[in-house]
Image: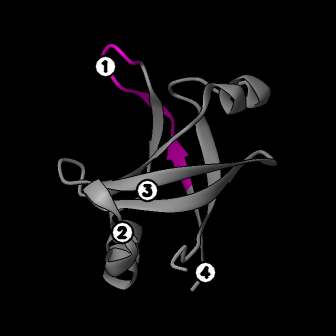
C-alpha cells in the first residue's frame, strides 16, 4: 500500500553531537499514519519513505518518536544544501510511504 502525505513544518536541529536536522510530522497526521502502517514499521517505529522538499527527492526512513508523539523525518545535508534550508526554515514536505514487504 502506498500512502502520500503532504504537510508544512519547520526544520529543527537535534542538540546532540550528530547535529541531525529534522521535520516533525504533525501529531494528527502521525496518529493516522501509525494507525494504518504500524504493522509495516521496522525497529524503533521506522517506516521507509521517499521524501520531497522543493523538488528534491531522497530515500530515507521516518520513525515514531514517543517524546514528540509524532514521526520525525531526517533531512540529508545534500538536500539542505541544494534547497538552502537550515534550522528554522519553513518547508512543505511530501512523503510517500511504500510497503516494502516482498
Q: Residue 91's spot in the image, x, y percent?
A: 63, 43
In the image, which residues are magenta?
8-18
Q: How many numbered badges does the structure rendering display?
A: 4
State the SS at label 4: loop
Query: Circle 2: is it few (<14), some (14-19), or many (20+) Cα within 10 Å?
Result: some
Please check the rendered image and state whether residue 15 is part of the magenta-colored stretch, yes or no. yes
Whole-angstrom CA distance, mark 1 to mark 4, is: 33 Å
Query: Circle 3: is it few (<14), some (14-19), or many (20+) Cα within 10 Å?
Result: many
Q: Which mark is residue 15?
A: 1
Residue drawn where x is 81% and y is 48% of the image: 55
Q: Quadrant of the C terminus?
A: bottom right
Q: Quadrant of residue 27?
A: bottom left
Please tell me whether mark 4 or mark 3 is closer to you in this view.
4
Q: Residue 31's spot in the image, x, y percent?
A: 31, 73
For this orientation, the residue located farthest to the front is: 102
Q: Is residue 32 visible?
A: no
Which label's residue is closer to the chain start, 1 or 3? 1
State the SS at label 3: loop
Q: Which residue is mark 3?
A: 25
State the SS at label 2: loop
Q: Which residue is mark 4?
A: 2
Residue drawn where x is 18% and y is 47% of the image: 67
Q: Which residue is mark 2?
A: 41
In the depicted view, which residue is nearer to us: 84 or 96?
96
Q: Is residue 87 above or below residue 79?
A: above
Amino acid at each position: 500500500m502506498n500512502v502520500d502525505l503532504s504537510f508544512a513544518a519547520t526544520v529543527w536541529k537535534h542538540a546532540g553531537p550528530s547535529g541531525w536536522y529534522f521535520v516533525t510530522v504533525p501529531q494528527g497526521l502521525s496518529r493516522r499514519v501509525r494507525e494504518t502502517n504500524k504493522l509495516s514499521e521496522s525497529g524503533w517505529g521506522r517506516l521507509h519513505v521517499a521524501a520531497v522538499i522543493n523538488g528534491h527527492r531522497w530515500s530515507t526512513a521516518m520513525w515514531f518518536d514517543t517524546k514528540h508523539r509524532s514521526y520525525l523525518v531526517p533531512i540529508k545535508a545534500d538536500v539542505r544544501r541544494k534547497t538552502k534550508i537550515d534550522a528554522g526554515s519553513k518547508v512543505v514536505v511530501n512523503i510517500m510511504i511504500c510497503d516494502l514487504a516482498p
